Structures are given as C-alpha cells and as structure tokens.
Amino acid sequence: MISRVGTVSVFVSDQQRAKAFYTEKLGMELRTDAELYPGASTRWIAVAPPGAETELILYLPDENWEHYRGTVGKSQAVTLSVPDIHAVYNDLKAKGVTFVSEPEVQPWGTFATILDSEGNSLLLVQETPQA
C-alpha cells in the first residue's frame, strides 16, 4: 500500500538560484544537495517546508529528461499550503517575490499565485476550515 508522496519535481534552469529562492525567500529547509550521480554536473537538490514529509526536487532536466525542458517557466501544478495567506503574502512581497495573482477567496479556500526564480508558477493556498 502507498503510504505517502515522497518527492515532487519542480523543473528549473538554474539549480543554485532555485535553491536560494526556495530556502531564503520561501523559508524551506535544504534536505539534500548532492551530485545526481558520481561526476555529474547536475545535483539532487531537495527542499521542503520545515517538518514536511514530501520534498520538492529542484531538477535541472538533462538528456534523460529532455522532454521536461519545456516545462521550466510554466505552471508546475504544485500547491503550497499556508496557514495565513495574507501574512504570507505580505512577507513574500517584502522579500521581492513576484505575485501573478493576489489572494482570491473561493469556496474551498483562498489562493494566490507566485513565480519562483525560474518563472515557474506555484499556488499558495489557505484552505477553508471544514465545518
């Protein structure tokens, strides 16, 4: 039986720039930064919110993953949960994070869309408490 989601890849064009963005601007922990394989020029960079189980892999598409190069700078279909979207919005704006959309209320919660250092769009979501 499947017990959890282990990793989700976010495709980037500059791993070091992306690592700085996710750790310094978004406040994620750096879990792993190692050679993808011995002698590789690319790295296995894993980041995650403090205490989270699922990690984001900041993956630089190589010849084995060429078909993902076109996804860099697009929507990564990743949702990041936040406890207070307005506080996070203000904090990230102060850090210079680009917002594509300001917080918008929906029946399922409030969301905003940001761009990471690579131009990838990510959703920030504060879910509506269930009754």
Image (cartoon, rainbow, N blue to C red):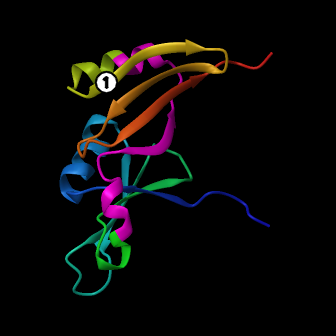
The picture quadrant where one finds residue 6 is: bottom right
In this view, the residue farthest toward the bottom is 38
The picture quadrant where one finds residue 27 is: top left
Q: Is residue 123 above or below residue 68?
A: above
Residue under the point 27% across and 87% down: 38
Instruction: Judge whether residue 24 is colored magenta.
Output: no
Q: Is residue 45 left or right of residue 94?
A: right
Instruction: Judge whether residue 82 is colored magenta.
Output: yes
Front residue of this view, candidates 62 and 24: 62
Q: Is residue 130 left or right of residue 12?
A: right
Magenta region, residue range: 67-89
- Figure quadrant of the C terminus: top right
Residue 15 image offset from top left, x and y in percent: 23, 58
Front residue of this view, candidates 21 and 117: 117
The kind of secondary structure element at disc 1 is: strand
Please tell me how crowded label 1 is: few (under 14), some (14-19), or many (20+) other residues with Cα within 10 Å: some
Residue 113 image offset from top left, x and y in percent: 40, 28
Q: Is residue 114 above or below residue 47?
A: above
Residue 56 image offset from top left, x and y in percent: 44, 54
- The residue indicated by pointer 1 is 99
Name the residue type under label 1. Answer: Phe
The picture quadrant where one finds residue 70 is: bottom left
Residue under the point 19% across and 50% down: 17
Residue 76 image offset from top left, x and y in percent: 43, 46
Residue under the point 32% across and 77% down: 36
- Figure quadrant of the N terminus: bottom right
